[in-house]
Image (tube, helix red, strand yellow):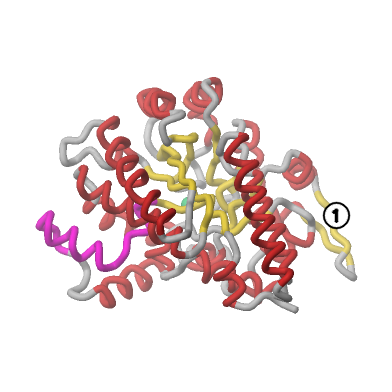
Amino acid sequence: MTVSPDLVRAAPKVALHDHLDGGLRPATVLDLGREAGVAVPGETPEEIGDWFFRTADSGSLPRYLETFETTVSLMQSTAALTRVAREFVEDMAADHVVYAETRWAPQQHLRGGLTLDQAVAAVQEGLDEGGPAAAEAGTPIVVGQLITVMRQLDPDPALAELAVSWLGRGVVGMDLAGPEAGFGPQRFTELFDSVRASGGHLTIHAGEADGLESIQAAIDCGAERLGHGVRLVDDLTSYGSGVMSLGPVASRVRSDKIALEVCPSSNIQTGVCRTLADHPIGALWRAGLPVTISCDNRLMSATSMNRETTLVSRQLGWELEDLRAVTLTALESAFCDEETFERLDRSVNKEFDALGALGA
Ligand SMILES: [Zn+2]
């Protein structure tokens, strides 16, 4: 039996790719705009939600990124960052996400006078506030921060120092984001190496707006996961009756278990494909690649973990065990410590066993 929306809601989920500045609630955009005296695109949460979706839905990555100027301008104080981070936890927990990482670029949040360290502290405060409330509501969740570096800016060693100084206190690693084509990751290797040498992890946006070479470059830089990575499909050759041959890059991704953080609705908006039926996720999944599902930007895509998971499950005709497999793949690729992994692995399997016993 294929997975139903109710079953997706009931199942534990893992969200690896979610931008803090892409997941604000429309009502929060409205409140923060009033508090900061910044004009926002709408007078009601509905109007605001609609504006973000329409503007991001133009089919081009540069236009999509424009919507972030609005959210980032509202996240320039301790109170705003803390609120958005707390709501990230609440919203993920409400979708029964048991492990989530939020990524954001602290250097974009200094216009109000915050230092890099104060900005990270503000986000961590919100993440810490959200946790106990989620546990009390019966939906415990573990969260981590990823420090995003913007690829169009010059490498700033202060960002690596920042990430390293917060390792073990909420930050789990580093991410590279921004316009992919023409801005290779190689310039940032010193930053990446220093974070990894201190025990931090690395994920790089690659294979979304650019192709296989970009994916190869990310892997060469030590990426343990790929943000999107969907253009890996260019390295697959399929022969009739579902037989798939993997090229060298895809083979490496599969053997090294470099998880693909696939965000289907976002990919459609940025022009990777036209519809979910055309999305490479089906081919990547059938090729046995480590596919995971995330939202990227819940505000811009008007989506949620439940929605993305439901869409993919329906498209690929998934059954309960497929849902378990994609969740466990994500958990195995989570940037958490061994003890947290083992605890979550046990509880996730227990929940799926229970759902299976219910005849789901
Ligand atoms: Zn992203």
**Where in the figure is residue 281, as x and y percent of width and height?**
67, 63
Q: Residue 297 at what x, y percent from top left?
A: 43, 59
Q: Position of residue 159 (x, y in %)?
A: 38, 29
Quadrant in which the N terminus appears: bottom right
Element type where label 1 sits in the image: strand
* Residue drawn where x is 16% and y is 41% of the image: 112
Q: Which residues are magenta?
A: 20-39
297 sits left or right of 327 in the view: left
Q: Residues within 10 Å of mark 1 (few under 14, many from 20)?
A: few
Disc 1 marks which amino acid? Ser
Magenta: main secondary structure equals helix
* Residue where numbered disc 1 is placed: 245
Q: Can you name the residue that lies furthest to the left here?
A: 37
Q: Which residue shows up at 43% across the image and 41% down it?
A: 145
The reply to whether the magenta stretch includes residue 22 is yes
Return the x and y of residue 15 as percentages of the image width and height. Answer: 53, 54
Which residue is painted at 76% across and 40% down in the image? 252
